[in-house]
Amino acid sequence: MSWSINEVARESGVTSRTLRHYHAIGLLEPAWTADGGRRYYEQEQLLRLQRILLLRELGLGLGAIGEILAAQDGAGAVEVLRRHRAWLLAERDRFDRLVATVDNTMTTLERGGTMTAQSMFDGFDHNPYEAEARERWGDKAIDDSMARQRSWSKEQAEQARTGFDATRAKFAEFVAAGTPVDDPQVQEAVHGHYEWICLFWTPNRESYKGLADLYADDERFRQNIGDGNDALVEYLRDAMKVYADARLA
């Protein structure tokens, strides 16, 4: 039995555009493609899509999901699902702890009591992406970035808070005007983005181009940056790569 891309999109809640993107980056190949390019999926592909969505629910990016799936490809479907089930149960336990913390806070406040700082924040994951970042870029890179943030001046902290929104607004104007990505005005805006990134870490040519790809390939970044405007995200990616080739070593 097979399902068309539109049927899979309807049943899974994943847009056909996203399914095509998963295909383009090698994350989810269709079982076969009909004349005219329409994609069709069978049970094997639906099981893989389920695994992708489970990992997305755990907050992982597409790059990390691809690595996990590649490592799991030799295992049986039931064994893989058993691992995902264990991860989901761990997440459920974490949310149970958060609910207990909120309940405890409400009860304490109603009784006029006070809570320790430790009990007030029990169960909170202050940076849900830190473990993924450490695995991808290493402890030293993340520790150095955190040290930079602790040393920010008031002006730098404000730049960190507002800098990216300013960059996004400029690029939306460039996209609307059809300005080429190598236009000097565009490249000057990219320089502003690079300076904003340098508040957190200092990328070289290769890592800045890798960040550009991450913006476009990771669904979380794509959505946060473009808010549905994929053309904006892809334009920023291309402009960043031009900048990296021209100005970074």
Image (cartoon, grey):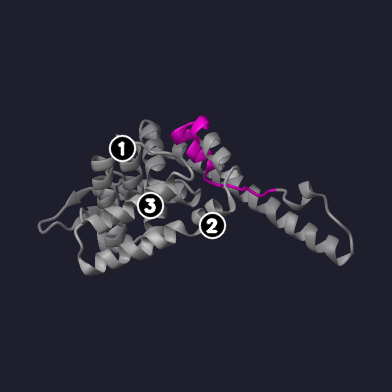
User: Nearer the viewer's eye, disc 1 or disc 2?
Assistant: 2
Disc number for residue 193: 3
Disc number for residue 158: 2
Q: Which residues are magenta?
A: 123-141
Q: Given the current orientation, which residue lies at the most extreme left position? A: 35
The 10 Å Cα crowd at callout 3, few under 14, some 14 to 19, many 20 or more, is: some
Ranked by sequence position, the earlier of labels 2 and 3 is 2
Given the image, on which type of amino acid does mark 3 rest?
Answer: His
Residue 245 visible in the snapshot: yes
Horizontal and vertical percent for residue 45? 31, 48
Disc number for residue 104: none
Given the image, on which type of amino acid does mark 1 rest?
Answer: Arg
The 10 Å Cα crowd at callout 1, few under 14, some 14 to 19, many 20 or more, is: some
At 72% from the left and 48% from the top, the residue drawn is 122
Residues at marks 2 and 3, CA–CA distance in whole angstroms = 14 Å
Disc number for residue 205: 1
At 35% from the left and 36% from the top, the residue drawn is 204
* In the displayed structure image, the side of residue 122 where residue 65 appears, left or right: left
* In the displayed structure image, the side of residue 137 where residue 34 appears, left or right: left
